Amino acid sequence: MTRAISERVHYFFEKEPDRVNRIKIALDTYFTDLDKLALNDRLLKKFPGSGSIIITSFFSLLYMIFGLPVFLFGFVNNYLPYKIPNWVSRKITKLPQFYGAITMIAGTFTFLIFYSIQLWLVQHYLHNILITLCYIILLPLSGFFAFFYWKRFTNLRGRWMIFSLFYKRTGLITSLISMRRQIIDELEKGRREYSEKIV
C-alpha cells in the first residue's frame, strides 16, 4: 500500500507539481492547527460521533475501571516484546514500507523468547502446572486486551478533549473538520484520476 501511494505521489510530482504543492500546504496547515490544539487526525475523524457522548463515555468509564487489573497484567507481561520489534525495525531500515514486515518477523522471535522465559520462571518458582497453563493462556489474551484497552482510553480522552474544545472554540473545530474533508476530497480526486490514466 505504501509503495502504491509513493507511485501516485511521484506521478503527480512529475505531471502536476503545483497541485502537489497546494495539497502539501493544506496538509501542513491542517496538521499544524491540530498540533496547536494537542489533537490528532484520528480523534477528529471520530467527531462528531453518533449517540450521546455522555452515555457512551459513562460505559467507557466503567470499562476502564473494571478492566484496569487485566490491563496492568497484560501491560507488564507484554510491553517489552511488543515494543522491541518496533525499535528493531527502525534501527534496521529508514524506509517506512518495510517497518511492518520487519516488525512481524522480529515480533515472532521476541514474543517466543519472552513468553518462554516467563513460563519457565512461573513453573520454576511455583511448581504448579495448572497455574503455568493458566498463565500461558492469559499471556496473549491479556496482551490483546491491554492493546485495545489503551486504544479505548485514548479515544475516550480524545473524545472529551474535542467535546470541550468544540464548545470553547466552535469555529476552529468546525474549520478543521471542513479542511479535513476538502483534503480528503482532493486526494480521492487524484486517486481516481491516476486510476483512469494508467488503465
Image (cartoon, rainbow, N blue to C red):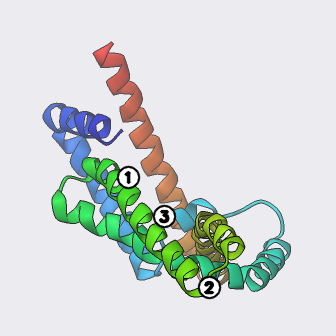
Residue at numbered disc 1: 104
- The Cα–Cα distance between marks 3 and 2, rounded to whole angstroms, is 47 Å
User: In this rendering, would 134 be left or right of 98?
Assistant: right
Task: Find residue 82 and report its image quarter.
Answer: bottom left
Which residue is pictured at 31% across the width and 42% down the height? 2
In the depicted view, which residue is nearer to us: 173 or 123? Answer: 123
Which residue is pictured at 33% across the width and 12% down the height? 199
Instruction: Answer above or below: position of 188 versus 124.
Output: above
Task: Find residue 136 and report its image quarter.
Answer: bottom right
| Amino acid residing under circle 2 | Leu
Residue at numbered disc 2: 126
| Amino acid residing under circle 1 | Met
Residue 21 x %, y %: 22, 50
Which residue is pictured at 63% across the width and 61% down the height? 46
Residue at numbered disc 3: 41
User: In this rendering, would 70 be left or right of 112?
Assistant: right
Instruction: Answer above or below: position of 62 versus 139.
Output: below
